[in-house]
């Protein structure tokens, strides 16, 4: 099994890892039994036009190199985007940006897309409570 | 990653490089002495002599007779031949097979296949170090047990089983005893008579011999059916043209392994123990999987909380260090190691394990480098992990 140079690069030099204390939304997905847990932290602010923009994003991941690389890649892909734009990013897009994943590791890209959706859902839930 | 001078290989349990002395011994059998040992002319005779000399040397290395050695292509094949061969040759007699839960996949899956053929397979419990529970085994051994198969020393955690005691218990009830010694052969002194072993699997490429050659020891009188049917080679138990080059190399590798055993095991064990104590004392939340004493002299299996094994392996690879999470054969799978979960580790704990296996060419300065680099790799991954202490 060979990882692409992009996967190895994101694994070796992960972008945006860590946590955000004042996150507007947090999404945790995966299962430690399967060996992958991904946690995404978002800071979302409304711009002048009232659009909700992802201002900052960080990740924490327990898992294989593909899980770490997909986490890192999604943070890069969505930062600065509106929620609407960010949610249009599919797992296949993440894999494509990483120069493809081994087939046994495609589920990692699904996990990354799910973590984002979960963090947005958490943000909306918190917002509605206000 | 290419093999440059700064690369460090600590995956000797996966495979070993061919020793230059072995390669030299093999060389003439590629061209000069290329004959088929089954041929009756001069070319065949030369090849046949080489095979029979190798057979004798390998037999004597485990106190067996030459006619008790069946050459095969791999430890996987030997294990398949042992389990399925016994089952097929002894149909409608006894129907129970006992195996340990920490067998290599080729034993586990052969046993599972035999379940589909009407055999009952039961797992012998192991303790948290991976040692067989002899009291339980004795209770499980009844007159319905046809075969018991227990790995001599674990490929993942290195734990060495009380083989002689297991052999004695099997003998008492007339169960056939097979042991997979793919990792033990060449690293431990083995006596098939003293340990009451009926069938024993070995492998060449684990002891600095070539890949693609192995043997199954089958004690005289033990009945097995062949899995392949063809010409009469290996007394019909394993027809195929013999891999003369491989067999010659295997015998040379065994000769070196056994003549240097005392010295080599002492040297490697010292390096192993240095690395274990250095890592356990410098990395918090680190543990040793397997038995602290009863383990192969070259095996280390660490467990680190909050990180995952594959990322550890790739993190080390970045520094030129070759290691593994466990059995190389199970790398593409996502499930945690069945060996580690059998010890009672949770799946999360099992996922955080790393196997380092030392060998003949491991240098003290390499061990020092690994002791420097591994804590950095673990700490980098822990910084990314959502789990913290």
Image (tube, coloured by chain):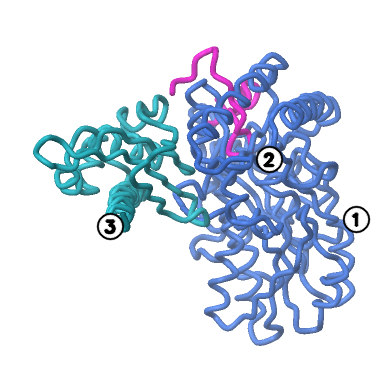
User: Which numbered disc flags the more N-terminal residue, 2 or 1?
Assistant: 1
Within 10 Å of the Cα at label 3, are there few (<14), some (14-19), or many (20+) other Cα atoms? few
Q: Residues within 10 Å of mark 1 (few under 14, many from 20)?
A: few
Q: Is disc 1 placed on a helix, strand or loop?
A: loop
Read off the residue under disc 2.
B301
Query: Magenta stretch containing residue B12, yes or no?
Result: yes
Q: Position of residue B72 (x, y in %)?
A: 58, 51
Q: Which residues are magenta?
A: B1-29
Q: Is residue B292 magenta?
A: no
Does dot 3 land on a helix, a strand or a loop?
A: helix
In the image, what residue occupies the spot 84% across and 45% down? B294
The answer for how far apart the CA atoms under marks 2 and 1 are is 30 Å
**Which residue is located at x 74 percent, y 32 percent?**
B280
Disc 3 target residue: A128
Q: Are marks 3 and 2 on the same chain?
A: no
Identify which residue is drawn at 18% across, 37% down.
A81
Please tell me which residue is depicted at 56% across the width and 56% down the height of the picture: B77
Query: Which numbered disc covers residue B358?
Result: none
Q: CA distance from mark 1 to mark 3?
A: 76 Å
Q: Nearer the viewer, residue B225 or A14?
A: A14
- B335 sits left or right of A84 in the view: right
- In the picture, the disc for residue B194 is 1
Q: Which chain is cyan?
A: A
x and y, in percent, of residue A78 in the image: 23, 37
Q: Colour of chain B?
A: blue
Q: Position of residue B189 (x, y in %)?
A: 84, 42
Horizontal side of residue B296 vs B370, given as left or right: right
Q: Is any atom of residue B78 visible in this view?
A: no
Q: Chain of mark 1?
A: B
Chain of the residue on which disc 3 is drawn: A
């Amino acid at each position: 099994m060979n990882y692409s140079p992009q996967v190895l690069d994101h694994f070796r030099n992960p972008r945006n890892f860590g946590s955000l204390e004042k996150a507007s939304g947090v999404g945790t997905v995966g299962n430690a039994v399967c060996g992958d847990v991904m946690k995404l932290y978002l800071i979302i602010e409304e711009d002048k036009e009232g659009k909700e923009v992802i201002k900052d994003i960080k990740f924490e991941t327990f898992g294989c190199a593909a899980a770490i690389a997909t986490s890192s890649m999604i943070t890069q892909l969505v930062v600065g985007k509106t929620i609407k734009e960010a949610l249009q990013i599919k797992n296949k897009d993440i894999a494509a940006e990483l120069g493809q994943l081994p087939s046994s590791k495609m589920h990692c890209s699904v996990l990354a897309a799910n973590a984002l959706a979960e963090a947005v859902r958490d943000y909306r839930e918190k917002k509605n409570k206000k | 990653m290419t093999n440059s001078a700064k690369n460090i290989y600590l995956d000797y349990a996966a495979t070993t490089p061919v020793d230059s002395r072995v390669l030299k011994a093999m060389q003439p059998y590629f061209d000069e002495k290329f004959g088929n040992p089954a041929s009756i002319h001069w070319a065949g005779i030369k090849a046949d002599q080489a095979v029979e000399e190798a057979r004798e040397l390998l037999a004597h290395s485990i106190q067996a007779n030459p006619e008790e050695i069946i050459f095969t292509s791999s430890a996987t094949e030997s294990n398949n031949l042992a389990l399925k061969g016994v089952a097929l040759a002894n149909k409608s007699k006894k129907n129970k097979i006992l195996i340990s839960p920490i067998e290599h996949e080729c034993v586990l899956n052969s046993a599972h296949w035999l379940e589909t053929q009407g055999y009952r397979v039961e797992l012998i419990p192991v303790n948290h170090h991976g040692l067989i529970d002899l009291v339980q085994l004795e209770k499980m051994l009844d007159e319905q047990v046809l075969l018991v198969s227990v790995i001599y020393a674990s490929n993942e955690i290195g734990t060495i089983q009380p083989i002689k005691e297991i052999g004695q218990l099997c003998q008492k009830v007339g169960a056939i005893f097979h042991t997979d010694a793919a990792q033990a052969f060449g690293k431990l002194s083995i006596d098939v008579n003293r340990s009451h072993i009926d069938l024993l699997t070995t492998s060449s490429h684990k002891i600095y011999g070539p890949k693609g050659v192995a043997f199954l020891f089958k004690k005289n009188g033990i009945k097995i059916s062949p899995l392949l049917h063809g010409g009469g080679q290996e007394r019909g138990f394993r027809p195929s043209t013999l891999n003369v080059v491989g067999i010659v190399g295997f015998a040379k590798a065994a000769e070196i392994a056994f003549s240097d055993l005392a010295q080599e095991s002492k040297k490697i064990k010292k390096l192993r123990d240095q690395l274990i104590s250095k890592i356990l004392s410098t990395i918090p939340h680190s543990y040793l999987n397997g038995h602290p004493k009863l383990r192969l002299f070259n095996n280390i299996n660490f467990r680190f909380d909050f990180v995952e094994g594959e990322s550890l392996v790739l993190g080390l690879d970045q520094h030129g260090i070759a290691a593994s999470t466990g059995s190389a054969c199970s790398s593409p799978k996502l499930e945690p190691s069945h060996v580690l979960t059998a010890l009672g580790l949770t799946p999360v704990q099992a996922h955080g394990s790393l196997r380092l296996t030392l060998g003949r060419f491991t240098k003290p300065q390499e061990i020092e480098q690994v002791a420097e680099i591994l804590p950095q790799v673990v700490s980098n991954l822990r910084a990314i992990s959502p789990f913290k202490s």
